[in-house]
Every structure is written in structure tokens, then in C-alpha cells.
Image (tube, helix red, strand yellow):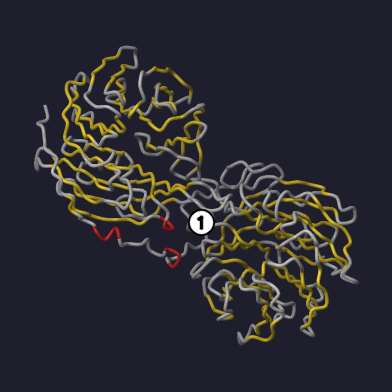
Amino acid sequence: MLRPLLLLSLVACISCKSRESKPPDRDHAPIAEAGEPTMANPVSTGDVDLYGDALPKGASGRLGSLRMVDRSIRQMIFTPEGSQLVSTHRDGYQIWNLTDGSRGAVLEHESPGEHMAISPNGKVLATDNDEGTNVQLWDMGTGKKSAQVAAKSPLAGLCFLTDKKLMAAFSDGAIRVWDLDGESTAFQGPWKDAKTLACAPKAGWAGVGTEDGDAYVVEINSKTSVVEDTTKLGNVSKAIESSAVASDGSAFAFGSADENIYLWYEPKAGEPFSVQAHDRTVANLAFTPDSSQLYSTGGDWWFRKWKPENGELLEELPGIDGLDAQLMALSPDGNLMVSWSQHGGARGSEAGRWWLWNANTGDLLLEPERHRGAITSVQFSPNGEQIATSSEDKSIRTWDAKSGKNTGRRGGSAGIVNDVRFSADGKTLYSAGADALIRAWKHGTKKESVVVEGVGGSVNRFLLTGDGHRVITGDQIGRVWAWDRASGNQIQAYDGRRYSAIYDIAQSPDGKLLAISGSARVVGVIDLERGQEIAELNPGDTAANFAVAFSPDGSLLATAGDGHKIQLWNTSDWTRRTTLSGHDGTVRALAFRPDGKTLISGGNDELVRVWDIDSGKETATLEGHKGVVTSIAIAPDGSQFVSSSRDRTALIWPMPR
């Protein structure tokens, strides 16, 4: 039996710098060139994207993978051979293939719980339900349920002792070991409100942590898998939320809501000690297979690695984009670590993302092939072969317009990138955003130059005039300015100081007119040659106008905003031609087809709508985005278009007939 130990209330801040540390700025890290992503090189086929994930009805491609993205994860574990991961989600248990991040089978369950265990041979998965009152067994080969075992009180944890022996700890103190062939044994422990269970079956030990902060060690006969005794190690100030036992039984670790890891190193040291490990609850603990190191996460930015015998901090690894590293699992061989981070933010952003790491080097091996923030703008190249996107993740990306494959990423912006444009010859990419600069990249390279400096406010939209000599910007503080592209000098101001923020600008096809929309009830139209306003359009039902677009022949101007409607105006006399009604929410994006007969729109209702200009009728409603539609671009030949969204992806659609 393990001898009783007294809890030493040592609070040794081994890594006090964690409270002052900030996640590093990863936006200035080396940028992956096209072909570098670690995802497999897949091929697009019909109703699925190039990674094999289903496309929405009517879409032909997706810019940005859905892989390694999931919502509301409660727990995750590696399969014994380490090539797959099993996670809980709303509808059951998702199996992931870690070689390429693709989704495998889904084990459907009406009320999945957070506790899981996989037999050493990988053939059986054990799970609980949301109430923790029964245990479900699954055949990992077929994905089918094989048996169910009822429990009298909520479950605290599961672990396999052998391929045939499954142990469960319950909140009421009961421990039960089931033989998968039908027999079971029971043991009554001294605890109440148990919350966590960890096992080292070969060493004959398990650890149990409780809501009251009690830490217990359970002694198991390694030959018979019978629970023989329990020993209380001590009590900590708050609930124990995580636990781990070294595979050789040399160390026991418990993570608490008081932000500490409590370590009992036995038998070499014999005295428990605590380490202030994270800025929040210590949510995950995992020993390496050789028992020499301990990993932890705590709902802050960091993964940390510790020396079990003395609590020395060996290494810390920052999470991605400053996201809380809320879940972590270590592969059975100790070479891989997977993390999952919960996203907050606006409606439409996905709830959580997976990241796969080399546990030995800290290198990121696998991440979602997509923007890390909402896509703010989308643009076709002049030849229609490439698509460019800008994002709140401070970068722009280029994509193959046929396959949807990512062909490059450019970053380095000091803030959100709100807009992206190709030059008329397609050889240069321009971008602008929160850093109040217009940046340019030569296509196919990362050579960057700053075209316009000191715009003075976050640039929401910009355009390159048809003559190629000027850049016109609309910014977050309500200014519309023209700049000489060669010198970067300001040429003229057009806004009239009507708006507190500019949301969109559009130039007429002949280059003579500029339409301005923003935080006002009216849309202004400027004569660019004279620099004077010639029209003031009042839709009558909006407090702000978010989108403007001229028809290809210049005879119409489309405007839209928070009034949920689209207005079409005759540019000959600025009278209203018609109103297009159908959106349920603010309309944020407008684009005319090159033949001028079709208008495409998108907005807060997460839908893309297609309109016939002559009849004013909606001819198609396209579903598929999981967030606000932010931008729409149509291919130069009118054969397809792309819509971007706050869901961090863009969808390619064939032009509806």
C-alpha cells in the first residue's frame, strides 16, 4: 500500500513570468509559401471540396478547409497507435484522421458525455452519457454500439486496465471494474463528489480528484485488476479538475481550480509540492510515456512542460493567435500533442479549432488550411484564374479559382486587413486595413512595398482608378481621399465630412463617378473630375448604407444597408428604378454580373441571393455560409462568383441560369 503523505502547502511560483507573459505576435512569423501546408494534396470532386468535405448545394468549391474545426468539444483522446483522435461533440463522438486532418466516422449519441477511454488494443471505446449515469461500449472497427452498463451515480472517469477490464470511478465513492465478458467487481472509496480519474494500470495505480479538493491514490492489483485500497494524499484549496499518473507509478499530478498543479513524487522525494502553473484552472495534465515529463494546459495561452520530481519548468509553448489552450492530449508515444482552442467573437465565427504539434520540438504540424479570422473582402484576378481574400487575421491569401487550393499567404500587417485588390495587369496585389497603409505585393512573391502611408484612419475600402494612377480610400473616420499611387501624396478629398465611417466606395465604369456609402442615411455620388457631389440618394429606410455597386454599363447604381432592401437607381437622373426585397437582415455585399442582367447580394442572414435586374425578382437563394456574408466577387467572364463570410471561408458558385 502507498504510505500516507501530508500535503505540503508550498506555493513555489516556479514560472511567475506566466502572469506577465503575453502570447507572441505570430503575424510576423515566417509565412508559408504555396505548397508548404502540411495537409495532404487532395483533389476536388463534384459535391465535395478539395479536402473531401461536403459542399453546400450549388457550390463548386470552398476557399478554406473545414478540417480540424469543430464546436463544443468536451474531451479528446488519441487511439493507441496514435494515428487517430476521438473527440466529443454535440451529436456524439467524432473520429479524426491525424495524417491529414480529415473527419472519419461519427459515433452518434443522443447525449454524449465528456468521459472516454479506449482499450489498449484499440478495439473498444467506452463513453458515458451527458448525465454520467451509464457507460456505453462501442466497436471501433464498425462504429456500432456493443453494450451499455448502467450506473447509480454520476461518473468521474473511465480507464481500461487491460483489453478486457474497464474501470470507472463514481462521484459517490464507488469504483467498479467491468470484465467485458460480463463479470464485474465493486469497491467503495471514501470520497464524495469525485470529478476526475487517471490510471497507470501497469504500475497498479490510479488517481482520483474531488470537488472538495481531495486527492486520492487507488491501489490496483496489476495481475487481477482488483481494487485493493485507497489513500488520501491531501486536500487543496479548490476543486480538482484534472489528474494524471505516471506510467511507472512514480508521480501523481492533480490540477486545481486554484491555478496550481499539485505533485506527489513517490517514492524518491516523498513530499508533495505545488506549482503555480497557469493563470486559470489547470484543465489538462499528461505524463510522457517514460514518466520523465508532465504537460499541462490551463485555459490560458500556454502549454507548459514540467519536471515531475521537482516542478521545474522545462519548456512553454504559446498557443495560436492568443487563443486559450483549453484542451490538450498527448499521443501514446509522446511525440505528438493535439490542442483545441475555443473561439469567442461575433456570430458566425466557428467555435473551436484543432492544432497538432510536435511535442519534442514545439513545431506546429497541422492546422486548419484557412484564414484564422473572418474574411473581409474577396476579389478575382483580371484573368479569372486566381482569387484573393483579406482577413481579420492580418493577412491576405490567394487561391486557385478552379480547385480552391491555397496558392499563397502574405502577412505582416499591423492590423485587420479590410480590402484586397488586383492591379489591372494582375501582377500586383494591393491591400489595406487597420494599419492605415496601402500595401502592394508583386504576384507570386512576398516582396512588399508601401504605396500610401499615413492615411490617418483604418481603411475600410479602397479602389484603384481605371487610369491606374490613383488610389481612393474610404476610412473608419469618415474620409474619402484620392492619392497619387506613384508618390503616395494626397490629391483630393471627396467625402464632405458627412459620414463618421465609410463602409463602401464604387467607381463608375467610365471612371467619372464615385459612389460613397457609410454611417448615414444617404449615399453620395461624386463627380471625380470636378470633385463635387452631384447626387444625394436617400433609400428612406436605412440608418446606414453598407454596399454600393455600379452596373457594367454605368446606367444603374445599386445601394444597400441595414434596411434589409436593395435599391436600384437610374444614373441618368438619379431616380429610383426599383427595390429588391428578400434579405432578412443588413445587406453588406453587392456585385453585378458583367452582362448587367444579374445582381448578387449577401448579408447578415448568411444567404447569397441572385436577382434578375429586368424583372426585379429573386431567381436563386444560396445557403451554405455559417456567418455573415461580407463580400462578393464575380469572375470576369461571368461564369462563376465567390462569396466570403465571417465563418472564415469563401464559397465558389457557378453562375445560376
Which of the 4 quarters of the picture holds residue 193? top left
- Residue at far top of view: 183
- The relative height of residue 70 versus residue 603 in the rendered view (above or below) is above
Q: Is residue 429 visible?
A: no
- The relative height of residue 571 versus residue 216 in the rendered view (above or below) is below
Q: Is residue 266 visible?
A: yes
Q: Residue at x 84, y 56 (%)?
A: 579
Q: Is residue 247 left or right of residue 553?
A: left
Q: Toward the viewer: 319 or 41?
A: 319
Q: Is residue 4 left or right of residue 445?
A: left
On the image, the x and y values in percent for residue 128 come to 41, 26
Q: Toward the viewer: 235 or 371?
A: 235
Q: Residue at x 51, y 26 (%)?
A: 110
Q: Residue at x 62, y 67 (%)?
A: 419
- The relative height of residue 175 versus residue 82 in the rendered view (above or below) is above
Q: Residues within 10 Å of mark 1 (few under 14, many from 20)?
A: many
On the image, the x and y values in percent for residue 1 come to 11, 26
On the image, the x and y values in percent for residue 38 come to 46, 52
Q: Toward the viewer: 540 or 351?
A: 540
Task: Please state the total of marks drawn on the protein image.
Answer: 1
Q: Toward the viewer: 195 or 637?
A: 195
On the image, the x and y values in percent for residue 472 come to 68, 77
Judging by the rendered image, the residue that carries numbered circle 1 is 372
Which of the 4 quarters of the picture holds residue 382? bottom right
Q: Residue at x 82, y 60 (%)?
A: 567
SS at mark 1 in the image:
loop
Amino acid type for the residue under numbered disc 1: Arg
